[in-house]
């Protein structure tokens, strides 16, 4: 479990860097990927290598489409890949889900802070009655800030690691 502490430390550094510079540095994400895979190689040899690479690949695959569509930066994708290299393929899916939930809550809070909660609730109401998701923000509102998704990845992964640490993930 000591390696999970290292992962959480990496996530704190990534979140702070994202908040300060809007970037997650390559030196951090690539080093984290190497540490995650190397740890599993040290513990389990060839099986550990496969475990780390599968987690890394799946972590990358879970976010790369959003990057291609312009919804997030490459640093976010690499950070989730690094998470996968530490936790493996099964748990990176859970971390991704908690990250998505955290990111969604974060986005709703931003919408509310910038006075667009009325637009959001109108879109949800339309979806409930028509089954179509239509979001048309008001034209006279301030421009919304972009989200610091590295923070969402850090929080979502932290929740996952804590649940895993306290044996609350018996379904995996």
Image: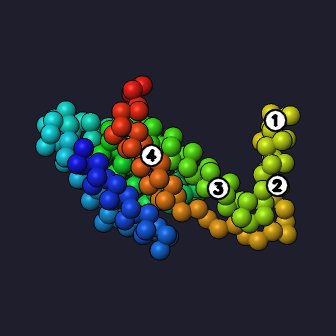
> Of label 3 and label 1, which has the lower sequence position?
3
The CA span between labels 3 and 4 is 18 Å
Element type at marker 3?
Answer: helix
Q: Residue furthest top?
A: 171
> Of label 2 and label 4, which has the lower sequence position?
2
Tell me the residue that label 2 is attached to: 119
Residue 127, position as x, y percentages in the image: 80, 38
Which image quadrant: the N terminus? top left
Task: Name which residue lies at 32% across and 63% down.
Answer: 28
Which numbered circle lies on residue 107?
3
Horizontally, residue 21 falls left or right of residue 39, namely right
Task: Name which residue lies at 57% across and 52% down.
Answer: 103
Q: Is residue 71 visible?
A: yes
The CA span between labels 2 and 4 is 30 Å
Horizontally, residue 83 falls left or right of residue 119, namely left
Question: In front of the other: label 3 or label 4?
Answer: 4
Which numbered circle lies on residue 92?
none
Which numbered circle lies on residue 128?
1
Q: Is residue 33 visible?
A: no
The CA span between labels 2 and 3 is 13 Å
> Of label 3 and label 4, which has the lower sequence position?
3
- Comparing 65 with 138, the one in front is 138
Q: Are marks 3 and 4 in contact (CB under 8 Å)?
A: no
Q: Quadrant of residue 117?
A: bottom right
The CA span between labels 3 and 1 is 20 Å
Q: Are marks 2 and 1 in contact (CB under 8 Å)?
A: no
Task: Name which residue lies at 47% across and 53% down.
Answer: 155
Say few, some or many: other residues with alpha carbon within 10 Å of mark 4 (under 14 / 14 to 19 / 20 or more): some
Say few, some or many: other residues with alpha carbon within 10 Å of mark 1 (under 14 / 14 to 19 / 20 or more): few
Residue 45 versus residue 12 in the image, above or below: above
Residue 80 versus residue 141 in the image, above or below: above
């Amino acid at each position: 479990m000591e390696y999970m502490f290292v992962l959480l430390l990496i996530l704190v550094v990534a979140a702070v860097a994202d908040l300060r510079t809007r970037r997650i540095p390559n030196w951090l994400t690539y080093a984290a990927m190497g540490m995650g895979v190397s740890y599993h190689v040290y513990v389990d040899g060839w099986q550990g290598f496969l475990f780390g690479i599968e987690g890394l690949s799946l972590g990358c695959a879970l976010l790369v489409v959003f990057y291609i569509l312009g919804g997030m930066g490459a640093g976010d994708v690499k950070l989730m890949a690094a998470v996968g290299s530490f936790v493996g393929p099964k748990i990176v899916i859970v971390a991704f889900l908690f990250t998505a939930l955290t990111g969604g809550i974060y986005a709703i809070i931003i919408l509310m802070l910038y006075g667009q909660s009325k637009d959001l609730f109108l879109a949800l109401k339309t979806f409930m009655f028509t089954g179509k998701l239509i979001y048309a923000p008001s034209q006279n509102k301030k421009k919304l800030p972009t989200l610091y998704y590295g923070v969402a990845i850090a929080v979502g992964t932290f929740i996952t690691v804590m649940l895993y640490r306290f044996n609350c993930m018996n379904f995996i």
